[in-house]
Image (spheres, helix red, strand yellow):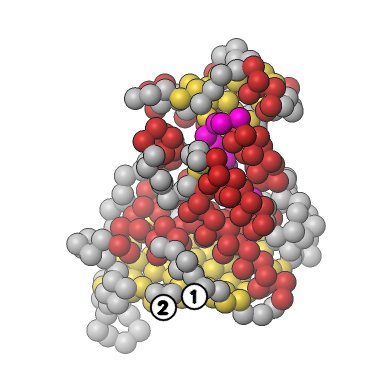
Amino acid sequence: MKVLKSIHVGVGGRGLWPLQEARAERGFQPVALVDLNPEFRAAAAELVGPLPQFEQLQDALDQVPCDVVIICTPTLFHVPLGKVALAAGKAVLVEKGMAPDIDTARDFVASVEQSGLACSVAQNYRYSAKERTLARVLQDEQDPHYVGRPFLIEYVQHRVRPDPGTLTYPYASLWDMSCHHFDNLHYWLGAGFEQISGVAYAAAWSAYEHPNNTSFHIRHRSGCQVIYTHTHDAAASETRIRIFGERGACCLDEDQIRFTPRGTRNFAPEHWEEVPLAEELGLAGLLADFHAQVCDGREPGISARNNLAVMELCDHAQRACESQTLQTWESS
């Protein structure tokens, strides 16, 4: 396995995960740390050793040979920093969301396509055991818990998050958090979302400047309807997913997934079965896909080009909230 030398940009908080996971046995070797905060750089150096430290990415690129740049800054800085890396001829792995708006996302993907370099977005949910299990029951006709052609998905996540952190721009919860869930929907159903309506709303006690909670009705070209709700102002955190198909229903409640075949009685399932979880790939799986993209040219589902469909869904969701009208578009 070729070991890729990686410069890490944004090494505090969420930025620590690539330093913990990007090891030689996985094909990565961190070679420099970039962050405006010297305390973050010092803490990261304790984790990976005394690497060269910089405040600016360009300085690191000028002085330290590397193959890839891994960017874990706030969303607003993903594209500007990604373009600096691409201009230097380096492959890029950027944290989710790829961009804070659709124009910026499209501009960035155009830059990636022009460069011919590998670029992926760290949409890591699709590598978890739960999301991979739901993909299996939706896609694998041989699986005993295959739900059949889905007609309805209910997707609910409430999060206790009183501190806005960097989510201080309009519809930040869409571009920074719902992008995870919208990527899951693309992972499960494939590209082809074409209609959305919904609202964004705030709570009176919220510390968020902008409406930070959303509810949407989304239609996929397959006919599957998605009812989606996400909040950051909740008093309790939970994740619930319900998938209803022609053969049965599959339900996720936090860490438990259950299946029931389509019943023959009114108002009651026949019985519930626990669904075995798929293998947990986690961030190691994400890095493996990015490594294969860089070294072998295999485009993963999380490539910047593929992730543009997620960004487009975020954009149509925002437009639906702003206009209070049904948004329709031609699916790609």
Tell me the quarter of the picture where residue 198 sits.
bottom right
Q: Residue at image x 72%, y 76%?
A: 323
Per the image, the residue denoted by label 2 is 223
Q: How many marks?
A: 2
* Left or right of residue 143, residue 267 in this image: right
Give the image location of residue 94, x and y in percent: 57, 40
Q: Give me the residue at 55% from left, 40% from top.
A: 115
| Residue 11 position within the rendered picture, expressed as x and y whole percent measured from the top left | 63, 29
| Bounds of the magenta segment | 88-99
Nearest the eye: 86 or 8:
86
Q: Residues within 10 Å of mark 1 (few under 14, many from 20)?
A: many
Tell me, yes or no, whether the highlighted magenta stretch contains residue 211. Answer: no
In the image, taking residue 146 as reference, residue 67 lies left or right, namely: right
Quarter holding the N terminus is: top left
Q: Relative to 243, is 37 above or below? A: above
Residue 31 visible, this angle: yes
Q: Nearer the viewer, residue 231 or 187?
A: 187
- Label 2, secondary structure: give it: loop
The answer to whether residue 123 is seen in the rendering is no
List x then y, in percent, for residue 80.
Answer: 69, 41
Mark 2–mark 1 distance (CA, rounded to whole Å): 7 Å
Q: Secondary structure at mark 1?
A: strand
Instruction: Residue type at mark 1: give it.
Output: Arg
Q: What label does residue 219 carry, if any? A: 1
* In this rendering, position of residue 278 left or right of residue 14: left
Give the crowd class for mark 2: few <14, some 14-19, many >=20 residues within 10 Å. Answer: few
In the rendered image, the vertical position of residue 11 relative to residue 310, given as above or below: above
Identity of the residue drawn at 63% across and 23% down: 61
Vertical side of 268 occupied by 148: above or below:
above
Marks 2,1: beta carbons within 8 A: yes
Task: Say what amino acid the circle numbered 2 marks.
Answer: Gly
